[in-house]
Image (cartoon, coloured by chain):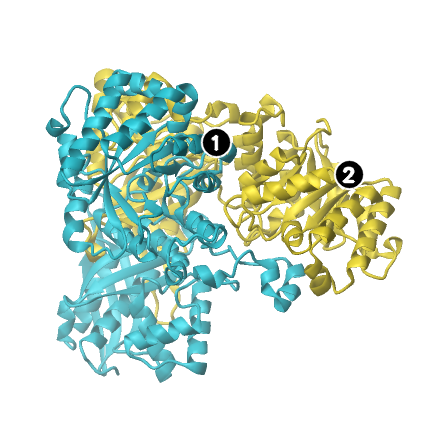
Chain colours: A cyan, B yellow
């Protein structure tokens, strides 16, 4: 990506300030890979030194993240008042993160300097100057987030501009103007951006959605001359969220004609938005512009016949451009072409009528709550079934039962019994576990391991439970995703049902079946 | 409300085009009363004649709706091509609705006239002229929604303007320009509105959120001279939704200084947004500007100490003005200041040593996987325990047991038995459910409802399961969050454990305890 225009993602830092959003280091790595594949220019990974998780993220990123497009940015603050930048351990952690970019938050509102930082306006400028030039001298590129810039500009215009100038003169490549409290409206915001652009620095914009205008504010800033725009995947963020980066990208590319990401990358945007939402475990709003499940869904009967004549009469863009679909069953599999490609990737020849049947089966299952995005093994089993006319099967299930209890002495017990048939035998096995699904897993392996010794290599590495939208209380539809490994590869399976145990069992059964297939056993 | 500026709600008509939103006649009456109490000027009730429900709504509205501020509007279309307005049964239904206002949708995009209406451009103008003047003569006030206006203006500017002129000359009081496909951005939209305002009609604006700019577009139109703004409660609507009327009202009143609704009405906006969401059964986004549960929630520890000095440094408006409230999210990121603030918010005096103890307890629990950000009720129970030296308790649990099974005939059964002690009694109860947690919930309520009848109001509205980091397969640590409601307030509880059922039980037990506390029962 050229340096002419920056798309800067802060999902992993500012986005994770959202209520209820808690990302593990592994979640962060997964999300960073998705954002990179979309083609964003910068990914702000967190605040190294501020908490062990973020420090660990930057350490792992050096070996485990192989970014193709994006550069990693470490977020941190200017040095403390009265200290040298070189002596400030917080600044040292930014340097030690070895991120190619450091983004420093700096106060630009006079009252915040006095009340929150409790230092003088002059010392705040010195803190900016010293920290920027120190990190530059250490070989890092430095961006500055001018916090509360718009409120600061209203309160003390000269000082706010002085902060921008100081940062730029000390060597900051970008000064991002932050509408930290999110209260701005586009016209007023654009006027301020315009003045700052005139002042000489390369200007960025960072908006929050407290007025419901974060996207429009970002666009207004770009029109006023900003060439660096910050936002978060799916609009995550504190309070009402940050500017939704996917909406911003869609608008800049499709409405303003800017060349933000490649066409092929844009066509992945819907898939990526959903994949990120799986990782954050925050339900993606079906109304989300461009990428939401309903974004191109038509209900009005009035429209239906006219849509047949010319769909473009009733949609603002061609949904395929962002990987979405007017018929609205969003999935990376939703088109025949992607099923054919996916089949090829898995080593199957799926085309023509057969591909159409698979698409229709996938759409039907997705409408019931299944997802194949993160369940490649379930998709492959489905594909094999469609091609062979029968399920790949190593055993059949007669019944299963789990008892989970807490006894009067406080001890908790989970015990499962499965009755299965395999290679002509009827096998009954019972297993215990520290939870009901673990107990079922133990019982099923115990039943099958004598007949299929390779099963010993199977390990369940992750287990995700998701309650689907439209749910009400404990009687909602549950989706379970299980990631398994045999030490060589990892794969995902999915189960869906009103009953969390039954959904888990489904995913478990497919995980075991797929591991037996991979181990080279002949299906029965 | 003066006629100088119109706030026009179309929740009951265009909002109900949202995927998954289905309103009964009673729902519509409830929502209309809420919108009226907020002080909107017009409530579009539906399309009488198009379906029996909407016809019934207008019939019932005459006797059952006692609107204080708003006028009711009936939505419909211009007459059919080749028919007299007086002979068109669809137009007759609009008249017979006896709504004081009729809003007619009219085509203003030449291609839509040809392809969707299949008539001539001249006949379309005649249809507008005849229908408006007929209904005016029948004594109704007439507004016209110019459909696809902005796309039409781009395609055939002269014709789009001719539609506006024709409607105005025939006696329409308002011509609302509709961005039907929702693809406009504010600058371009404002330019068009400006030209139409110059053309002499009173101009309204109707925006959809497909570019994420519906609110900004509405504000831009008002700045360009529109004096009638349409939108939907909570941004309901087809695809990405309509302009969120609550956000528009908040912005116009608090950011643009317009006198849209009374101060006392504005202070009800948060309550009304949630009440409407109850009626539609569509969960209100916690991120919703002004009215969302998270709209004034702060997580960053950095902020908490400064917020104590001056809360206005960290919020774009005083949340009380819209009936919302600042909340501090308790998380390991935060320190004593946020615990003190959170305690105050809940009505407890926690300071000094006690606050430090609570912080240390919270950090310890968070390190085990608990989170209190989304579990305010669990936090309050913890706070009460620290202050009183004992848990708030209404019952003690001797034991519980769940059996979940799939029988050989494929039928799945979940059955739970709980043994509890309350008010000196030992109670054993068994419940079934469509999953194990649902079964436990049923059994526990059944056990306690005789002693605590208010428990009947408790409803579990959401249930989230998350597998925590450091997880390995099915023996991972599970966190369960349950959101509950008693019809007046909503609260969250949390449970953590290796066993998903045990974690759910913990969250369930606290949800029940908190509901009994709220209902005013004395703890044992």
Residue A282 visible in the snapshot? yes
Residue B109's disc is: none
Q: From the image, state whether disc 2 or disc 1 is nearer to you.
A: 1
Residue depicted at 41% across the width and 24% down the height: A153
The percent coordinates of residue A53 (x first, y second) are 19, 42
Percent position of residue B31, x then y: 62, 39
Q: CA distance from mark 2 to mark 1?
A: 35 Å
Residue B37 in the figure: left or right of residue A345: right
Q: Residue furthest left?
A: A87
Q: Quadrant of the C terminus of chain B?
A: top left
Residue at image coords 14%, 54%: A63
Crowdedness of circle 2 by 10 Å Cα count: few (<14), some, many (20+)? Answer: many
Q: Residue A191: which disc?
A: 1
Q: Nearer the viewer, residue B7 or A375?
A: B7
Residue in the foreground of this view, choosing between A208 and B265: A208
Is label 2 on the same chain as label 1? no
User: Circle 2 is placed at which residue position?
Assistant: B173
Identify the secondary structure beneath mark 2: loop
Which quarter of the picture shows residue B355?
Answer: top left
Chain letter for mark 1, please: A
Label 2: chain letter? B
- Tell me if residue B20 comes above or below residue A423 in the rendering: above
Above or below: residue B310 compared with residue B82 = above
- Quadrant position of the N terminus of chain B in the picture: top right
| Visible residue check, residue A498 | no
């Amino acid at each position: 990506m050229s340096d002419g225009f920056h798309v800067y993602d802060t999902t992993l830092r500012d986005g994770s300030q959202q209520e209820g959003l808690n990302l593990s280091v592994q979640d962060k790595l997964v999300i960073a890979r998705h954002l990179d594949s979309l083609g964003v220019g910068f990914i702000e990974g967190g605040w190294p030194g501020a908490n062990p998780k973020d420090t660990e993220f930057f350490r792992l990123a050096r070996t485990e993240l192989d970014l193709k497009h994006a550069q990693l940015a470490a977020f941190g603050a200017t040095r403390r008042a009265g200290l040298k930048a070189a002596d400030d351990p917080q600044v040292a952690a930014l340097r030690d993160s070895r991120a190619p970019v450091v983004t420093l938050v700096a106060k630009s509102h006079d009252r915040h300097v006095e009340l929150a930082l409790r230092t003088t306006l002059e010392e705040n400028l010195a803190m900016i100057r010293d920290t920027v030039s120190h990190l530059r001298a250490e070989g890092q590129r430095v961006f500055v987030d001018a916090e509360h810039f718009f409120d600061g500009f209203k309160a003390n215009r000269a000082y706010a501009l002085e902060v921008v100038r100081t940062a730029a003169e000390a060597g900051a490549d970008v000064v991002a103007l932050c509408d930290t409290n999110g209260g701005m409206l586009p016209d007023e915001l654009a006027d301020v951006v315009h003045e700052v652009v005139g002042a000489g620095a390369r200007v960025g914009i960072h908006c929050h959605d407290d007025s419901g205008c974060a996207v429009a504010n970002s666009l207004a800033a770009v029109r006023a001359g900003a060439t660096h725009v910050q936002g978060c995947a799916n609009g995550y963020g504190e309070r009402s969220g940050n500017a939704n980066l996917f909406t911003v990208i869609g608008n800049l590319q499709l409405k303003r004609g800017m060349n933000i990401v490649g066409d092929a990358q844009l066509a992945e945007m819907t898939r990526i938005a959903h994949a990120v939402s799986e990782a954050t475990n925050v339900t993606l709003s079906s109304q989300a512009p461009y990428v939401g499940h309903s974004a191109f869904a038509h209900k009005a009967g009035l429209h239906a016949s006219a849509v047949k004549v010319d769909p473009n009469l009733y949609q603002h863009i061609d949904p395929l451009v962002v990987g979405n679909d007017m018929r609205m069953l969003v999935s990376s599999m939703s088109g025949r072409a992607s099923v054919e490609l996916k089949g090829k990737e898995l080593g199957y020849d799926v085309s023509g009528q057969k591909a159409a049947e698979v698409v229709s089966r996938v759409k039907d299952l997705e409408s019931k709550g299944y997802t194949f995005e993160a369940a490649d093994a379930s998709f492959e089993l489905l594909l094999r079934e469609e091609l062979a006319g029968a399920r790949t099967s190593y055993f059949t299930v007669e019944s299963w039962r789990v008892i989970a209890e807490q006894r009067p002495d406080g001890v908790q017990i989970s015990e499962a019994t499965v009755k299965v048939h395999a290679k002509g035998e009827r096998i009954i096995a019972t297993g215990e576990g520290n939870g009901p699904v673990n107990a079922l897993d133990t019982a099923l392996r115990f039943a099958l391991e004598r007949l299929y010794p390779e099963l010993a290599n199977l390990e369940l590495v992750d287990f995700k439970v998701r309650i689907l939208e439209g749910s009400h209380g404990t009687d909602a539809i549950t989706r379970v995703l299980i990631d398994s490994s045999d030490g060589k590869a990892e794969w995902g399976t999915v189960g869906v049902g009103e009953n969390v145990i039954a959904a888990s069992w489904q995913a478990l059964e497919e995980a075991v079946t797929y591991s037996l297939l991979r181990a080279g056993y002949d299906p029965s």
